[in-house]
Image: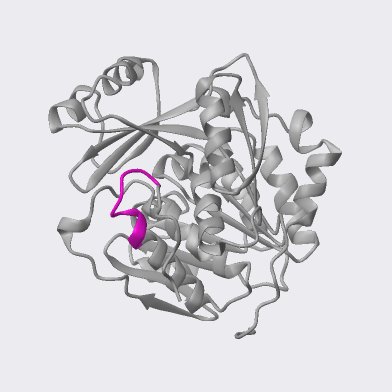
């Protein structure tokens, strides 16, 4: 792949679609987790008995509100890494006509992301409670409006589909499989038929467990599959891979059936502070992450999203996989030093 002078990126080269959520983030104790039956490093969808959790978390002394949603975080980080031109990243998702929705619009604009939200007034804008305990975080998402995304009301509109067609790289987190698998398939097939790059994330163990069917419908169109070690293990178990060796899981995932044979699938698994594992051609390679002092880790919420964002920022510039992973490690390293998926004004990445 070319190095040196990269052609200037054009607007809407990177397309993301997912659940736009407002993160409500607070430091909690073990009792709080136990009270609501939360695991240390999990991501789940809110159920009836979590209602009280949202009421309680906003009462915490140091509660913070940040624009969130896994895919939206990633495209925002990619845009931050790219800097110029603005609006290289496009984002689609559904919000409510309310104060939280206005915050998300404002934050997307400040991040120079070209966000086109489907706005409806039946459900309020989605929220995600990020319950922080030391360097762990447990996420509870109340999708609300995010769950109301409709292909025919938004994605299919000519003006929106034109933006999809402009892109060269597509990224959708697995979380969106619970909302609109038909929207994902439409985008994935477009990418595959036009030899463009479609990326997906395993996102959370519950996706492989309870949304395996839609996940596997999209898999033949996936050029790059992301995930972390827990998600990889669950995916392997659900697919009967009969191995818990992360490199082997990556290899087996790479070899799953694929529509566009012009591109070999790449699988990238992060493992927190341990090496990132990626298929590079026929072999599986390990890439050590950047060293960080335990005391500098403020909040790991958004680390995985940030890794993907950094990776995508290099991918749209057509850089080699090693470069993409280096950019991913850099942005994740920046994010975990801060609360929420937030970042300084400019990256310091060469």
What residue do we see at 56% from left, 56% from top?
Answer: 79
Where residue 275 appears, as percent x and y from the top left, is: 32, 70
Identify the main secondary structure in magenta.
Answer: loop
Q: Is residue 338 magenta?
A: yes
Quadrant for the C terminus, please.
bottom left
Q: Residue at x 70, y 71 (%)?
A: 8
On the image, the x and y values in percent for residue 12 come to 71, 54
Above or below, 242 against 7 in this view is above
User: Quarter of the image holding residue 159?
Assistant: top right
**Quadrant where the image shows the N terminus:** bottom right
Q: Is residue 267 visible?
A: yes
In which image quadrant can residue 191 be found? bottom right
Q: Which span of residues is magenta-colored?
A: 333-341
Name the side, left or right, on which 40 lies relative to 118.
left
Q: Nearer the viewer, residue 276 or 145?
A: 145
Q: Please state the horizontal and vertical placement of residue 241, each as a whole percent of the image.
A: 43, 60
Q: Residue at x 61, y 62 (%)?
A: 84
Closer to us: 70 or 47: 70
Residue 296 image offset from top left, x and y in percent:
20, 57
């Amino acid at each position: 792949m070319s190095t040196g002078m990269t052609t200037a990126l054009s607007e809407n080269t990177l397309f993301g679609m997912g659940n736009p959520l407002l993160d409500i983030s607070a430091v909690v104790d073990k009792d709080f987790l136990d009270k609501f039956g939360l695991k240390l490093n999990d991501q789940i969808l809110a159920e009836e008995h979590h209602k009280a959790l949202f009421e309680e978390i906003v009462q915490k002394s140091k509660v913070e509100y940040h624009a969130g949603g896994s895919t939206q975080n990633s495209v925002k980080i990619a845009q931050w890494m790219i800097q110029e031109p603005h609006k290289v990243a496009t984002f689609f998702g559904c919000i409510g006509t309310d104060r939280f929705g206005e915050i998300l619009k404002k934050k997307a604009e400040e991040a120079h992301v070209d966000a086109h939200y489907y706005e409806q007034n039946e459900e309020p804008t989605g929220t995600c409670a990020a319950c922080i305990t030391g360097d762990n975080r447990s996420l509870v998402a109340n999708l609300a409006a995010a769950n109301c995304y409709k292909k025919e009301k938004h994605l299919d509109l000519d003006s929106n589909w034109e933006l999809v067609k402009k892109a060269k790289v597509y990224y959708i987190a697995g979380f969106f499989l619970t909302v609109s698998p038909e929207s994902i398939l439409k985008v994935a097939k477009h990418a595959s038929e036009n030899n463009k790059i479609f990326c997906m994330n395993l996102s959370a163990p519950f996706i492989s467990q309870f949304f395996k069917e839609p996940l596997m419908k999209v898999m033949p169109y996936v050029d790059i599959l992301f995930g972390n070690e827990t998600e990889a293990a669950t995916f392997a178990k659900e697919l009967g891979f009969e191995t818990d060796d992360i490199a082997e899981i990556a290899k087996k995932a790479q070899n799953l059936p694929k529509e566009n044979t012009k591109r070999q699938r790449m699988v990238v698994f992060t493992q927190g502070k341990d090496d990132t594992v990626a298929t590079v051609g026929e072999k599986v390679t390990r890439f050590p992450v950047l060293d960080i002092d335990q005391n500098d880790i403020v909040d790991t919420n958004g680390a995985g999203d940030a890794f993907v964002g950094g990776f995508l920022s290099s991918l749209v510039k057509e850089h080699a996989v090693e470069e993409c992973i280096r950019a991913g490690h850099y942005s994740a390293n920046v994010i975990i030093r801060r609360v929420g998926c937030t970042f300084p004004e400019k990256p310091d990445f060469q």
